[in-house]
Amino acid sequence: MVMVRDLDHWIDGKTVPRGTQPAMTVHGPVDRRSVASVALGGASHVADAVAAARGAGPDWADRAPVERGRLLLAVSSALRERAEEFVEVEVEETGKLVSEMRGGLGVAADYFEYYGGVVRALFGETIGLGSGDHAFTTREPYGVVGMITPWNGPLTQAARGMAAALAAGNTVVVKPSEFTSSTTLMLARLCEEVGVPPGVVNVVLGTGAEVGAALVDHPDVRLLAFTGSVTTGRAVAEGAARRLVPTILELGGKSANVVFADADLDRVVESALTICVGAGQQCAALSRLLVQHEVHDELLDRVAAAMRERVPGERLAPMTTEGQFEKVVEYFDVAARDGARLVVGGRAASGETAAGRYVEATVYADVTPQMRIFREEVFGPVLAVSRFGTEDEAVAMANDSDFGLVASVWTRDSGRALRVASRMEAGQVIVNGGRTGIETPFGGYKSSGLGREKGFESLLHYTQLKTTVVSTR
């Protein structure tokens, strides 16, 4: 029997009892049983958390980068030591496969390890102004950073932002999704256990309408980092603009996987199957498969056969929230009305897995740019397959999107690969399955967001630049 966890806010190094405040029950996606009771905070909890973060800020920012880095390295080690505990809890709340979540735990630990080391290389520049004047730049923290993280990758998303922000000398107030709050709270407690001072990391639980809005509006929050939907991201950006506060926004995608006739189809099939990782609930999912005429039918058959093997509950995770489950099922009807040809799947799962939020791994063919499944982010294990003839057609189809987060290109022609990559309107282009990592900056063009996470570039976004000019005359 799954134990229901009582989750309360973590502010200034202490658990804040919920008292008489409202709470909500979280139902796990695997079988819809209750797994957590989450306190629903409000503006007063945000105010307390921001005050704690602001109070802890000067001491944290004044520490030498090497000292902050060593504490982040300690967080990384502690995460690895307690990996199974984190994996078990997040699997209950998100429904991820255990193998997927073990990989995610490793990535979360990697973030703290990477920023714990690379922060020592963060420095400014000197500027020559001629004899008698000396100018230099320094990178300084913003102060209190407000973070709003999503339900599809709670631990990795929290780690990604927290590690960079803390390395740069900021303090943080995190609002995780109310559906998947447990591992963010566990991470905050872990930070203090290894020596991060109270108040440097705070977590306020609740909804976006209450806690998220209060965090956006608080006058002492000097930078906002948000990962989630375009609609909510725009609201965050509008609130930040009223206060002239910078934002880092990662808002999703409808990424194109472009396959030319000379591609290595074995590897392309593997790439196409990444739509099933986390049941497709990932902003970087390669959800549009654009295939050149000459190999279209062969590749479609091979991808369809491989997708049939992604059995819900065995090799395919469920939808994390009830709302997302209903959304994906609705898109099956949308695709049918628009005239897409169903090749595989297209239904909610039946049988033993029907008790959970499972849908079938799905492939649609003959998808045109006018169809909604070509244009809209389904956020499920749903692959839209289209065909093209020429290189120009491929680029035009790939760029025919409001999103621009990731693009992928497959061809053995190195000249064409680089040419097409340079024309892609995306923040990250992967050629022939190139491997990305913690070191590679990540973020989008167009409606996919603003700013960059990951890599050294992220440290620049979590710091502000100061120029100092000294007269030596």
Image (tube, grey):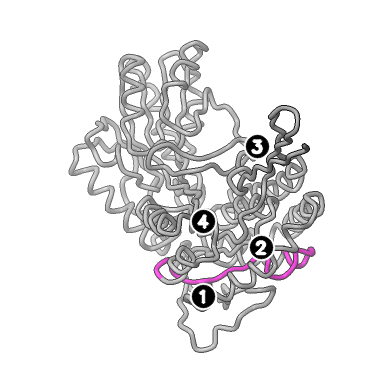
Quarter residue 75 falls in: bottom right
> Which disc number belongs to residue 187?
2
> Which disc number belongs to residue 224?
4
At 46% from the left edge and 15% from the top edge, which residue is drawn? Answer: 419
Q: CA distance from mark 3 to mark 4?
A: 22 Å
Q: Is residue 349 above or below residue 195?
A: above
What secondary structure is marked by label 1?
strand
Residue type at the position of mark 1: Val
| One can see residue 27 in this view | no
Judge whether residue 160 is colored magenta: no
| Quadrant of the image containing the C terminus | top right
Q: Which residues are magenta?
A: 191-209
The crowd level at tag 1 (other Cα within 10 Å; few <14, some 14-19, many 20+) is: many
Residue where numbered disc 1 is placed: 38
Residue 340 lies, in percent from the top left, at 23, 36
Residue type at the position of mark 4: Leu
Tag in front: 4 or 2: 4
Front position in the image: 121 or 18: 121
> Which disc number belongs to residue 432?
none
At 65% from the left edge and 51% from the top edge, which residue is drawn? Answer: 108
Tag 3 or tag 1, which sits nearer the N-term?
1
Residue 160 lies, in percent from the top left, at 61, 50
Q: CA distance from mark 4 to mark 2?
A: 20 Å
Q: Is residue 459 above or below residue 5?
A: above
Tag 1 or tag 4, which sits nearer the N-term?
1
What secondary structure is marked by label 2?
helix
Judge whether residue 207 is colored magenta: yes
Residue where numbered disc 3 is placed: 439
What secondary structure is marked by label 3?
loop
The crowd level at tag 3 (other Cα within 10 Å; few <14, some 14-19, many 20+) is: some
The crowd level at tag 2 (other Cα within 10 Å; few <14, some 14-19, many 20+) is: many
